[in-house]
Image (cartoon, rainbow, N blue to C red):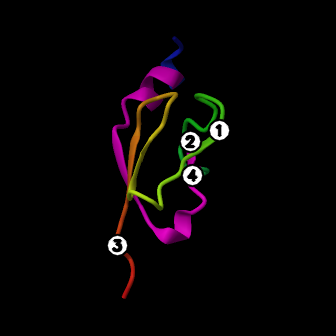
């Protein structure tokens, strides 16, 4: 595994907002954008999603006012 992919796999958990939808991993602003193929994650139903490639956990913040 190359260093970029290894670093990306260690990023852990991210809090995202409705402005980040549709959610993809890796997200466009992530430094290691090419660590694995982009995959879109269904997060609206449960408020959480895990990337099947790197295991990053995404949590949707409650931004409804």
Q: In this view, does 15 lie above or below 8?
A: below
Label 3, label 1: how many angstroms apart (C-alpha)?
25 Å
The image shows residue 30 at horizontal and vertical percentages of 53, 45
Q: Which mark is residue 62?
A: 3
| Disc 2: which residue | 26
C-alpha distance separating marks 4 and 1: 13 Å
Image location (x, y in percent) of residue 2: 53, 14
At label 1, counting other C-alpha atoms closer than 10 Å, the crowd grade (few under 14, some 14-19, many 20 or more) is: some
- Disc 4 and disc 3: Cα gap in Å? 21 Å
On the image, the x and y values in percent for residue 44 come to 47, 61
Q: Mark 1 points at which residue?
A: 38
Residue at the image position 34 percent from the left and 38 percent from the top: 12
- Under tag 3, what secondary structure? loop
User: For the residues carrying marks 2 and 4, which lies nearer the camera in this image?
Assistant: 2
The answer to whether residue 24 is left or right of residue 43 is right
Q: Nearer the viewer, mark 3 or mark 1?
A: 3
- The crowding category of the residue bearing disc 4, from other C-alpha atoms within 10 Å (few below 14, some 14 to 19, many at least 20), is few
The mark tally for this picture is: 4
Identify which residue is drawn at 37% across, 50% down. 14
User: Which of pointers 3 and 1 lies earlier in the amino acid sequence?
Assistant: 1
């Amino acid at each position: 595994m190359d260093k970029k992919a290894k670093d990306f796999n260690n990023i852990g958990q991210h809090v995202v907002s409705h402005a980040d939808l549709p959610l993809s991993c890796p997200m466009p602003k992530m430094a290691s954008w090419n660590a694995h193929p982009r995959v879109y994650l269904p997060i609206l139903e449960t408020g959480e999603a895990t990337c099947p490639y790197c295991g990053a956990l995404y949590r949707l913040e409650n931004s409804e006012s």
